[in-house]
């Protein structure tokens, strides 16, 4: 999942790397949802293709 950092934070799951405002990251959906709930990132887009149950959204 693609996210944009809205508040600086130290990423515990990535060796305490400092994430700065405006930085764009690709994260697993669960991690993206957690960080969005905490208020440090904003989800900008879902991964392309959608889920297999939605054939209109899949590529191919």
Image (cartoon, rainbow, N blue to C red):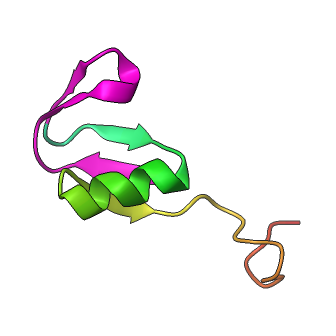
Q: Quadrant of residue 54?
A: bottom right
Q: Judge whether residue 6 is colored magenta.
A: yes
Q: Is residue 26 magenta?
A: no
Of residues 27 and 24, the one nearer the viewer is 27
Q: Quadrant of residue 60?
A: bottom right
* Extent of the magenta region: 1-20
Direction from residue 8 to residue 10 in the image, left or right:
right
Question: In the figure, is residue 57 to the left or right of 12?
Answer: right
Residue 17 to residue 59: above or below: above
- Tell me how many marks there are: 0
* Residue 36, quarter of picture: bottom left
Residue pictured at 44% horizontal, 48% vertical: 31
Return the residue nearer the eye: 39 or 20.
Answer: 39
Residue 58, percent across and down? 79, 71
Front-most of residues 26 and 16: 16
In this picture, residue 57 sits left or right of residue 55: left
Image-based side of 28 in relation to 22, left or right: right
| Extreme-top residue of the structure | 15
Q: Can the viewer see residue 1 in this picture?
A: no
Residue at the spot x=40%, y=60% of the render? Answer: 33
């Amino acid at each position: 999942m693609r996210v944009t950092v809205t508040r600086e934070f130290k990423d515990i799951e990535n060796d305490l790397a400092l994430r700065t405002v405006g930085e764009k990251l690709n994260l697993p959906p669960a991690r993206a949802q957690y960080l969005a709930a905490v208020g440090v990132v904003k989800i900008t887009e879902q991964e392309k293709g959608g889920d297999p149950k939605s054939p209109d959204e899949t590529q191919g």
